[in-house]
Amino acid sequence: MTTYAVNPQTIKTHVEAALGGLLKSSVVRLGELTIVVEAENYLKAAQILRDDPTCRFEQLMDLCGVDYSTYKDQPQSGPRYCVVSHLLSLSLNQRVRLKVFAPDDNFPVLPSLTGLWGSVNWFEREAFDLFGIVFEGHSDLRRILTDYGFIGHPFRKDFPISGHVEMRYDAELKRVVYQPVTIEPREITPRVIREDNYGGRH
């Protein structure tokens, strides 16, 4: 027996009814439902999305951080850091994208979802490592992709492309050493030379 995906508008109706006043916005675009909740409602809304019989999002498929500063080359409006989760209901064959913004740009903190979905553990560690978003209640929040001595969070848009620290092998010490970056930042613009009749024009 074939199970067809639920119409996104139907999912929207069910999610809006289940979350009620916890929902800040819900939009269907390109056939997908995206919902936004406030940080103080994040954990409660996530639990409802998992447990409500019309939602039943049993699996968290992905979680990532987003830095909205200079988003689409526009000045920042609203909070800078966002966490985006993709939830899947196998039993009802439906999906939803859940977004929440950290209220403090200087110290972004959000509740951890590790108590609801075990799969979120490493995703939250990655968002912490790359964006510096702290997940309150996470039992083992530490870097997962960068080195333990790494400085900063490399997916932040103000993080320098060359980084802050470089490592090299020191033959005298016979070990790897860390030192401040010695590469001078520069912008490389390729030189383009076109002939007068380039492209067959006379």
Image (cartoon, rainbow, N blue to C red):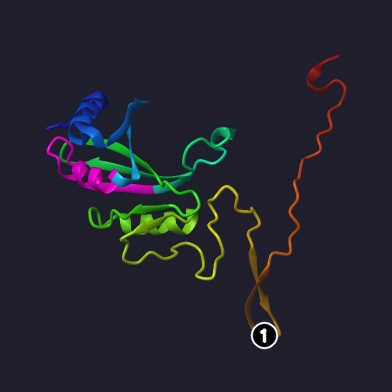
Q: Which residue is mark 1?
A: 173
- Residue 132 colored magenta? no
Residue 91 visible to an observer of this rendering? yes
181 up-or-down from 55: above or below: below
Q: Quadrant of residue 46?
A: top left
What is the x, y in percent for residue 65?
43, 48
Q: Is residue 112 left or right of residue 196?
A: left
Around disc 1, counting alpha carbons within 10 Å, would you say few (fewer than 14), some (14 to 19), or many (20 or more)?
A: few
Which residue does the image show at 67% across and 85% down from the upper left? 173
Q: Amino acid at mark 1?
A: Leu
Which residue does the image show at 51% across and 68% down from the upper left? 147
The residue nearer to you, when weighing 75 against 119, is: 75
Q: Is residue 105 left or right of residue 49?
A: right
Circle 1 SS class:
loop
Residue 57 visible to an observer of this rendering? no
What is the x, y in percent for residue 146?
50, 63
Q: Is residue 199 left or right of residue 160?
A: right
Which residue does the image show at 76% across and 57% down from the upper left? 184
Q: Quadrant of the C terminus?
A: top right
For the magenta stretch, what is the residue range? 41-63
Q: Quadrant of the N terminus?
A: top left
What is the x, y in percent for residue 97?
32, 38
Which residue does the image show at 44% across and 52% down from the upper left? 108
Q: Quadrant of residue 194?
A: top right
What is the x, y in percent for residue 92?
16, 36
Q: Quadrant of residue 118?
A: bottom left
Total count of labels: 1
The residue nearer to you, when weighing 153 against 4, is: 153
179 up-or-down from 31: above or below: below
